[in-house]
Every structure is written in structure tokens, then in C-alpha cells.
Image (spheres, helix red, strand yellow):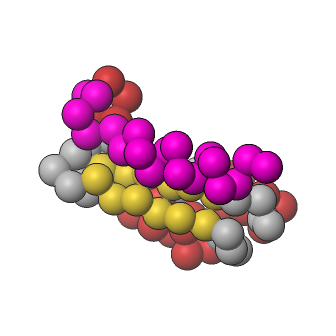
Amino acid sequence: MNMPLLSNIKEISPRPILIIAGADAHSRYFSEDIYKMAAEPKELIIIPNAVHVDLYDKIDVIPFDKLEDFFRKNLK
């Protein structure tokens, strides 16, 4: 687990946090742990049938609509 991020998660809040993880990613637990620790506003998106690296370059699994919604809502 990335301890510097865990120890600093409270300093990030209350800034909006969007976490995206593949359902089959070995690191999914880390995304879920960070999500639980973060204060609102926060959002966790789990992409079905995806591993970590799928979210880098598999255009068909990247949730562009969710990204756009999140940034439109939170970058004012």
C-alpha cells in the first residue's frame, strides 16, 4: 500500500476525488481503501472486466462520459 498517499488523504479533502479502477485489477483494493478514507466529494468507478493497464489505452473501456461529468461538475 502507498503509505504517503494514505497518510495525506485527509489533506486532499475536501477537494473532489475521482477514483477509477478495473474490476479485475490487482490494485483494486487500494482504490477502494482510498475511497473509504477520503471525505466527500468523492466518486469511485469500477470498470467491469478490466485490469489496471486496460484503463491506459483500451479506449472502449475508459469511461470518458464519467470523466466529463465529473470535471464539468467539479471544475467551476
Counting the numbered discs, the total is: 0
Q: Which residues, given as a range, are shown in magenta?
A: 58-76
Q: Is residue 61 shown left or right of residue 62?
A: left
Quadrant in the rendering for residue 41: bottom right
Q: Is residue 62 shown left or right of residue 70?
A: left
Residue 58 can be seen, yes or no: yes
Residue 40 in the image, given as x and y percentages of width and height? 68, 74
Q: Is residue 3 shown left or right of residue 34?
A: right
Q: Is residue 49 above or below residue 35?
A: above
Q: Residue furthest top?
A: 57
| Residue found 83% across the figure and 61% down from its top | 11
Residue 21 in the image, given as x and y percentages of width and height? 38, 52
Q: Is residue 7 above or below residue 49?
A: below
Q: Residue furthest left?
A: 49
Residue 3 in the image, given as x and y percentages of width and height? 65, 55
Comparing 14 with 53, the one in front is 14
Quadrant in the rendering for residue 61: top left
Residue 26 can be seen, yes or no: no
| Residue found 61% across the figure and 67% down from its top | 42
Q: Does the magenta stretch include residue 61?
A: yes
Q: Is residue 7 magenta?
A: no
| Residue found 47% across the figure and 63% down from its top | 44
Residue 17 in the image, given as x and y percentages of width and height? 64, 57
Q: In this view, does 3 lie above or below 61?
A: below
Q: Is residue 5 shown left or right of residue 11?
A: left
